[in-house]
Amino acid sequence: MLDKLTQKIKFSLARGAFLKRRASVYSQLAFALEHESDPKSEIENLLKIAKMRQSELEPVYLEWVKRFEVKAGRLALAMKGTVEESERTLIASAEETQNLASGLRFLARVTKQVQEMAKSIRSAFMSIVFPSVILFFVILFVDGYFFPILSESVPRSDWGAYPRAVASVAHFAKELVSFGSVFGLIAVFIWKASLPKWTGKFRTVLEKTPLYGKYRDLQCALFLMNLSFLTTAEIAPRDALERIQRHATPYIRSHIGTMLLALDARASDFGRVLVSTGLFNRELGDLIANYTRWTDWHTQLEEIATEAMDIVVRDLTELSPKIKEFLMAAVGVIVLILISSVALIILAMLRKSGINM
């Protein structure tokens, strides 16, 4: 039992390390395949070198080697659970089209862009966390320490309506945050689980919020990258969509299902079909609409996909300072309210002592 738990922990740590370095691993595999090697030999070599160098990636490569034979020599299936599903979709498409080397090379480039996006997301998140923590500790200090000390000198009944209201709100906010932290963790879990799975009208409403909206934009960019790779390999639009759909998450599968139905009605207007499901935001929809005026517009899909990723990075970069400024302003306003309420309590104390100001 303990051994299994230890192995799971080692594998989880190895997967985390691999995800940070996966772009270079994809490049290594692509380079080897371009030099007439084969996937089986290469993942065995990766494992051999990892063992020799006692690399933290060894558990990941060991899992690939074990699964490779069981999964009929399919690299995409062997990698399941160790790489992102959207990336595994592209690897599967590359295998099906006998273009694994170019697919991995393409994926290495895409992954670097995704990592840049992830860096922007982490930066945006951290810019929210810091002022939020400051705000929470200010409220915690005032409610748990400062107001109780003041109430020993001046009963709350003598504070006046405004300071009493501020104290009640501060106490309620502290209890709400403390009690809500557990529900917050549950909400984060539901959010992460729902991102790749929820579909339908409710999802459309959620995508008006930044959390779901930015996930949609990211998935749209990755979808375009997959589609670009397949169209470059001269795969027909319907076949390309079906190939992506086979390996996609429920969220993307739902959008592609709608695209395929629309393709039946408008087979000659692939651009309109792509933007008909709501996967594309307005800016990307306008971009594609401009390209679709030309018969060979699909040759620009990679450029459009790159632009899609640039848009997500730009939006996140712009959103982060705005949220930070709002939260810092909120901290300032709350501190001002607390100071003014304390000043009124002190005035009440002085009046009670017979000192007129």
Image (cartoon, helix red, strand yellow):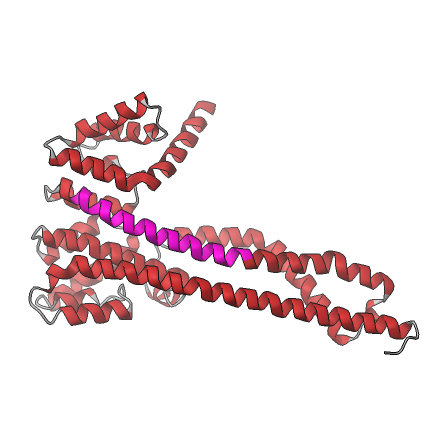
Judge whether residue 108 is colored magenta: yes
Q: Nearer the viewer, residue 200 or 97?
A: 97
* Residue at the limit of the structure toward the bottom, as seen here: 357
Which of the 4 image quarters holds residue 160? Answer: bottom right
Q: Is residue 333 left or right of residue 318?
A: right
Quadrant (top left/top right/bottom left/bottom right) for the C terminus: bottom right
- Above-or-below relation of 165 to 224: below
Q: Where is residue 24 in the image (x, y as percent from the top left)?
A: 26, 39
Residue name at image x 81 percent, y 63 percent: 150
Which of the 4 image quarters holds residue 178? Answer: bottom right
Q: Position of residue 169 (x, y in %)?
A: 68, 67
Q: Position of residue 301 (x, y in %)?
A: 16, 59
- Which residues lie in the magenta part? 103-130
Residue 114 showing in the rendered view: yes
* Residue at the limit of the structure toward the top, as seen here: 52
- Above-or-below relation of 355 to 34: below
Q: Position of residue 346 (x, y in %)?
A: 82, 70
Q: In this view, does 130 lie to the left or right of 51?
A: right
Q: Is residue 181 left or right of residue 162?
A: left
Q: Mainly helix, strand or loop, the magenta region?
A: helix
Judge whether residue 344 is colored magenta: no
Which of the 4 image quarters holds residue 176? Answer: bottom right
Residue name at image x 27 percent, y 47 percent: 111
- Above-or-below relation of 266 to 39: below
Q: How many labels does the image show?
A: 0
Q: Is residue 277 left or right of residue 329?
A: left
Residue name at image x 47 percent, y 53 percent: 188
* Residue at the limit of the structure toward the right, as seen here: 354
Residue name at image x 10 percent, y 32 percent: 36
Residue 81 showing in the rendered view: no
